[in-house]
Image (tube, rainbow, N blue to C red):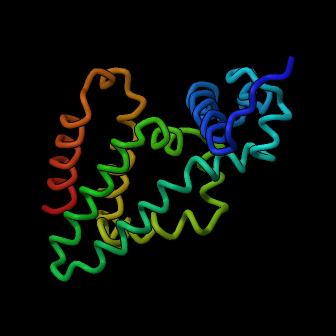
Amino acid sequence: MARPVAPRGEARARVLEAALDLFTTQGVNGTSLQMIADRIGVTKAAVYFQFRTKEDILRALIAPAFGRITDLVVRAQAEPDPRQRRELAIRGLVDLVVDHRRGAALLHTDPAAHAFLETHRPFQEPIRALARMLGGDEAVGRVRFACFAGGAMLCGVNPELRDVDEPTLRQALVDIGLRLLLD
């Protein structure tokens, strides 16, 4: 008997959710399309129908976040007051990290995800713009931004923070970002 077919958008979402689960526990290189198929109970061909490669899956997972970063940079750059601009950028970055804890951690800790970002210019530009806006061009400012952004992303995988609710995590990260990047 044939299995019922899910609508394409639902099937894609199931593949992406399974892939994110596996990428965060097994790593991108440690995850196969077959593993993703097994996780959601479909054939490898069904996964392949949605995405040809793991790179396509990774791109689909991170593209919405980078769209948000691009929008954030545009909104922040439109703010005439430099301090308000940076505060808006800090809050926006924190919102993104908290809303996508697992994905942020994956991008920061997985070598394959990091390599993907390094080779795909459209994903590099918004991060560089945000880094310049919050850290500037001087070494100390760049280090401050790297500490803040990297530390915030690692909150998604820190087992000591799993019990921290989103509003508390959000406020703590904003407070830290404001102290680190505005003072």
Residue at 59% across, 49% down = 114
x, y (%) of residue 123?
56, 63
x, y (%) of residue 93?
33, 55
Residue at 23% across, 42% down = 170
Q: Nearer the viewer, residue 121 or 75?
A: 75
Rendered position, 163 above or below 100: above
Q: Quadrant of the C terminus?
A: bottom left
Decide if residue 80 is in sight here.
yes
x, y (%) of residue 31?
71, 30
Q: Nearer the viewer, residue 145 or 57?
A: 57
x, y (%) of residue 161?
30, 25
Decide if residue 151 is in sight here.
no
Q: Quadrant of the N terminus?
A: top right
Q: Nearer the viewer, residue 16 or 32?
A: 16
Residue at 33% across, 43% down = 152
Please state if 163 lies on the left or on the right of 126 as rendered: left
Residue at 29% across, 66% down = 134
Rendered position, 183 above or below 154: below
Please state if 17 lies on the left or on the right of 71 as rendered: right
Rendered position, 59 above or below 29: below
Rendered position, 80 above or below 136: below
Q: How many marks?
A: 0
